[in-house]
Image (cartoon, rainbow, N blue to C red):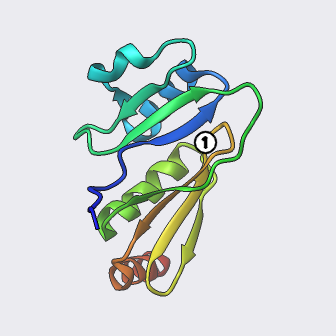
Amino acid sequence: MPQLTGIDHIHVYVPCRADAAEWFESVFNFKISEPLRFWATENGPHVIENKSATIHLALFKQHDFIPSTAIAFGSDAKNFIEWNKILEAKDIPVRCSDHQLAWSLYFHDPYKNMYEITTYDHAQVSQILQDNKKK
């Protein structure tokens, strides 16, 4: 069986690609993928990426909302806690869920697409959250 190397990119449907790109930059610091900028034609994707170019989102213009499945990003315990703080500081409603094996943060972009940041560092996050409640 041939092996896959990971997720290459995820399609995200938005009413305005430029506005969406600004939102992703302000929340995740994603920038336009320069090598793929030429694809951002009227019907093509506006591809954005994280600093290390390991995560790519293809922003497509969509006039009618089409719900997407959740896009889940991985994290470690320390960064998971930091993401929770950042999202809350940006007034983005966040639902933090304990899945017993993992912790997840769920939130939406302005276009109603759902995102998740998850960590399998369950014990560490549980301890940090418990310690934060005591303060």
- Residue drawn 34% across the image and 62% down it: 75
Q: Depth check: 81 or 48 in front? A: 48
Q: Position of residue 23 (x, y in %)?
A: 52, 31
Q: Position of residue 100 (x, y in %)?
A: 49, 87
Q: Answer left or right for 113 relative to 5.
A: right
Q: Depth check: 47 or 134 in front? A: 47
Q: Answer left or right for 109 relative to 77.
A: right
Q: Position of residue 81 (x, y in %)?
A: 39, 64
Q: Residues within 10 Å of mark 1 (few under 14, many from 20)?
A: some
Q: Answer left or right for 19 relative to 101.
A: right
Say above or below: 105 vs 12: below
Q: Quadrant of residue 33?
A: top left
Q: Answer left or right for 68 relative to 48.
A: right
**Residue named by callout 1:** 109
The amino acid type of the residue labelled 1 equals Asp
Q: Quadrant of residue 31?
A: top left
For this orientation, the residue located farthest to the right is 64
Q: SS for tag 1?
A: loop
Q: Quadrant of the C terminus?
A: bottom left
Q: Depth check: 94 or 11 in front? A: 11
Say above or below: 131 vs 59: below
Q: How many marks?
A: 1
For this orientation, the residue located farthest to the left is 52
- Residue drawn 57% across the image and 60% down it: 106
Q: Quadrant of the N terminus?
A: bottom left
- Residue drawn 52% across the image and 30% down it: 59
Q: Position of residue 119 (x, y in %)?
A: 38, 70
- Residue drawn 37% across the image and 61% down it: 74
